[in-house]
Image (cartoon, rainbow, N blue to C red):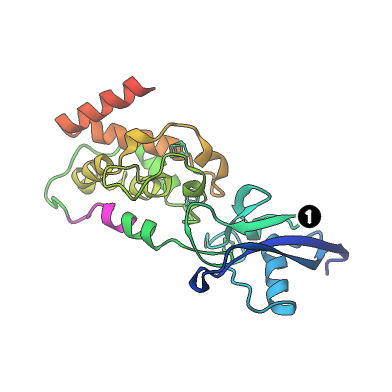
Amino acid sequence: MHLLIATCRVQVLRSDPSKGEKSAYSQYDVPRTEETSVLDALLYIKDNIDGTLAVSYSCKQQRCGSCALKIDGRVALGCFTPVKDGQVIAPLPGFAVVRDLVVDWTPYERKMLDLLPSTSEEPNRRRRAATEKERTLAESAATCIRCFSCVAVCPSVDITSPVGFAGPAISVALATYMDVDESSGGLASSAMEAGLEFCTRCGACNTVCPAGIDVVASIQGLQDIAGESGAKGKALKEMVRGYL
Ligand code: SF4
Ligand code: SF4
Ligand code: FES
């Protein structure tokens, strides 16, 4: 049993765009123990104060990635962040708000599905075996919980343009294919289509990732694979090198 420490007051940014509502902060007082997370506080509000509050969550254990929010100006998982007095809670930036703290990831997920290579592509043609480093990157990328926190902080992502940067979460999804030797032809073309040259290596994605994935290294690994895959890939690699 956890002892109540105090009641704390939080501000939650709320809106219902379907009704043409502008967003506005609402203030709530919630009980807090040393174990209470931001998500716990939001669910307390929903269950005890205002059942209309829209919140996205599933596992409550930092596994499903659905509770990413902007908390006191920083992107973080609601279930992994302790609630504090005076906290300001807003939806994940960079995505359209559905209602309150729920955002629409669909366009980004659609782009991800479009870019993922087909493992059945070139079934009888193997490239060189994946390197140890590529296997390690693929293993790490597989721990992605698809919270899209990295996308929210990325200054370069642009999925509205066909030649824009698909962003860090798609890059990590592509990196999971690095240890699938047969798919490398498809992976190289997906990597080239992902606009990786527009990544500035600012590292914001690495800093925010709750799974500790080295997103920047994943992008570098994909660029290397693209660079090995013919003239267009080589040109891309040279361009990236010149950029660094
Ligand atoms: S390092 Fe690249 S992918 Fe990561 S946040 Fe910066 S620009 Fe985006
Ligand atoms: S790479 Fe990290 S921050 Fe990005 S979606 Fe995956 S778990 Fe979230
Ligand atoms: S509720 Fe699943 S990661 Fe927070």
Q: Nearer the viewer, residue 102 or 208?
A: 102
Quadrant of the image for the C terminus? top left
In the displayed structure image, the side of residue 187 where residue 26 appears, left or right: right
Residue 63 appears in the figure: yes
Q: Does the magenta stretch include residue 119?
A: yes
From the viewer's perspective, is residue 201 above or below residue 141?
above
Residue 132 appears in the figure: no
Q: Residue at x 21, y 32 (%)?
A: 233
Where residue 152 sits in the image (x, y, percent)? 50, 49
Q: Specify the quarter for ligand 1.
A: top left
Q: Say which residue label 1 marks.
A: 86
Where residue 98 sits in the image (x, y, percent)? 50, 67
Q: Residue at x 83, y 66 (%)?
A: 2
From the viewer's perspective, is residue 188 above or below residue 14?
above
Q: Quadrant of residue 163?
A: top left
In the displayed structure image, the side of residue 102 where residue 126 appears, left or right: left
Q: Give the range drawn in magenta.
A: 112-120
Q: Does the residue labelled 1 lie within 8 Å of ligand 3?
A: no
Q: Nearer the viewer, residue 16 or 209?
A: 16
Quadrant of the image for the N terminus? bottom right
Give the mark count: 1
Where residue 142 sits in the image (x, y, percent)? 42, 51
Q: Quadrant of residue 229?
A: top left
Category of crowding for the residue at label 1, using alpha-carbon neighbours closer than 10 angstroms: few (below 14), some (14–19), many (at least 20): some
Q: In which quarter of the image is residue 27?
A: bottom right
Going by the numbered disc 1, the residue's amino acid type is Gly
Q: Does the magenta stretch include residue 233?
A: no
Q: Residue furthest top?
A: 242
Where residue 198 sits in the image (x, y, percent)? 36, 35
Q: Which residue is drawn at 24% across and 52% down?
A: 117
Question: Secondary structure beneath disc 1?
Answer: loop
